[in-house]
Image (spheres, grey):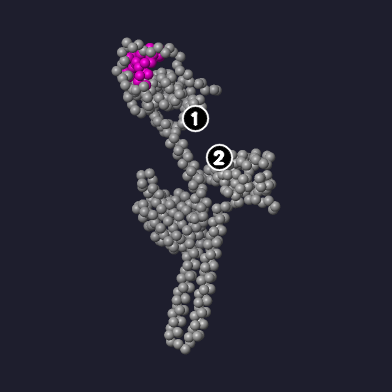
Amino acid sequence: MMARRFSPPRMSISLASANDPVPAFLGGGGEMGERIRRFPWHEHPLGPPAQWPTALQMAVSLCLNSSFPTAIYWGQDMHLLYNDAWSVIPAEKHPGALGRTAAEVWPDIWHIIEGQLRHVLTTGEGLALYEQLLPMERGGKPRETWWNYSFTAIRHVDGAVGGVFNQGNDTTELVLGRRQRQVEIERWRELFRQAPAPVALLHGPAHVFEFANDAYLRLVGLRDVVGKPVREALPEIESQGFFAILDRVYSSGQPYVGTAANVKLQRSADAAPEDRILDFVCQPVLDNAGRVESIFVQATDVTDRARAEASLRTSAWQLGEERARLAVLVEAEQRAQRSLHLLNQNLEALVAARTTELSTAMAEQRAMIDRLRAMFETSFIFQGFMSPGGTLLDANAASLEVIRSRLDEVVGRPFWDTPWFHGTPGIAEEVHRAVQTAAGGQRVQQVIELDLPVGRRRFDLSLRPVLNARREVIGIVPEAIDITGR
C-alpha cells in the first residue's frame, strides 16, 4: 500500500475575529502561540479555545511556554497542538500539522506510535522510550531517525484521560555516530589482532581481558584468556609481582615501563613454566571523566636478544680475565716478552673473531626481524580490505600496480566492479558470489585467471571473513598469490 502524502487541512483560511478575546492561557508561545491564536478553531472539532476543557487549557499553556520540544494529542482522534521547539520535528509538514489528527500527520510511523498513544489514552499509564527507531518521511523519502520521547496522560478534574502530553528530542546523530565509532573500533581491533607485537586490553580493577591479539595469545600458549581476570587467566605470574604493577597503574593512572623483565610463562597446558624475557608497557586508558577504566598492555619478547647480550657480557668478562692474567705474566716474566706478545696477538684475534661472530649473529637477527616484518606487512602479494557488503576500503601497492590504478580510484566501489575484473568476461559475477559467501562467514579460496593491463595472469584467490568477538562478520580480506606459470 502506498503511503498517503501529507496535505494541509481542507478548511477555510479565515482567521479568528479580531474582536474575539484571546484566552489568557494562550498568551506568549512565540510563533506557534501566534498561529494557535489565529487558527480558525470555530471550524475545528475542538471548537473555540475559550470552550476547551480546563485540562487542555493548562496543558497548552505549559506546552507553549516550554523551551523543550512539546506536543499535545487531544481527544480520541488525537488532534495535534505543539510549540516552537517541536515544530522542526514534522519537518515540511509544519505548519500544516497544527490541528490535524495524529493519523493524518504521521502516516509513515503510525504503525509504531498508534499503539503507544492508544495505551496511554486507555490506561492512563505514561510511556518513556529511548533511541526508538522512527522511519519518518523527510523530503519525500523515508529516513531512519532515532528519538528519546515520552507520552504522558493529560487528565480531567475527574481523573479521566483527555489527551497525551508528548516531549522528546532527536538522537539520530548520536546513534549514527555511535554506530560509526563501533565500525571503527572493530576495524582497529582487527588491525591490533594482526599486529606482530603482543597486545592486550585489561578492563576494570579486576583486570579482565577484554582483548588479546594473536601474538599475545601465542606468547601465553594460546590459552583462552578473553573474558577472564588476569589472576585466573595467568595464575603462574601471581608470585612475580605483575599483579601489583597492574593494580598500581589502575589506581594511580601512571604508566609503567618494564625493561628486560624475567617472566615465567606456561606456554602449554602440560608444560612447566618457561623463562622468558620481556620489554613491556602498561598504559592506563581513561574514560570521558578522566578515570582509569582499562589498561593497554604491549609486550615485546626479547629473550633471544637478551641471551645474546648475556653471552656478549660473558665473553667480555672472560676477555678481561685473560688480559689480567697476561698483565701478571708480563710483569713477572720480562724475558718472555716475545712469547707474551704473540699470546696477546692471539687473544686479540680471538676477541676480534668473537666480536665478529656476535656482530654477525646480531646482524642476522636484525635481518630476520626485517624479513619477518616485511612478510607481515605484505602478507600475500595482493591484499585488501572490504566491508561485509563488498565495498572496497583499502588495497596494498602491489595489487594497485597490476591494474595501474591509484587507491582513490578503487576505494568505495564494489570489489567485483573494480579494474581487476573489468577485462575478464563473466568473472565479476563469479567474484560477487564469492563475496556473498564470505559475507556469510565462510572462507572462499579458488583459482582464477584475469586479463589485466600487465597481461593474462593466474591467481590463487582467497576471501577471508573477519569476525569480531561475537562471531559477526565485520569485514572481508581479499588476498591473492600470482601463480602464473605454475
Give percent across and percent down for residue 321.
45, 78
Residue segment shown in magenta: 32-58
Residue at screen point 49% across, 45% down: 186
Residue at screen point 65% across, 50% down: 482
Provide the secondary structure element on which disc 1 rests: strand
Give percent across and percent down for residue 13.
42, 13
Residue 112 among magenta residues: no
Q: Quadrant of residue 430?
A: top right
Position of residue 153 in the picture relative to residue 369 (left or right): left
**What is the count of numbered marks?**
2
Mark 1, residue position: 143
Provide the secondary structure element on which disc 2 rests: loop
Reply above or below: 354 against 303. Answer: below
Residue most toward the bottom? 335
Residue at screen point 69% across, 53% down: 486
Examine the residues drawn in magenta and state their main secondary structure: helix
Tell me the tag on residue 412.
2
**Nearer to us: label 2 or label 1:** 2
Give percent across and percent down for residue 66.
33, 26
Give percent across and percent down for residue 61.
32, 22
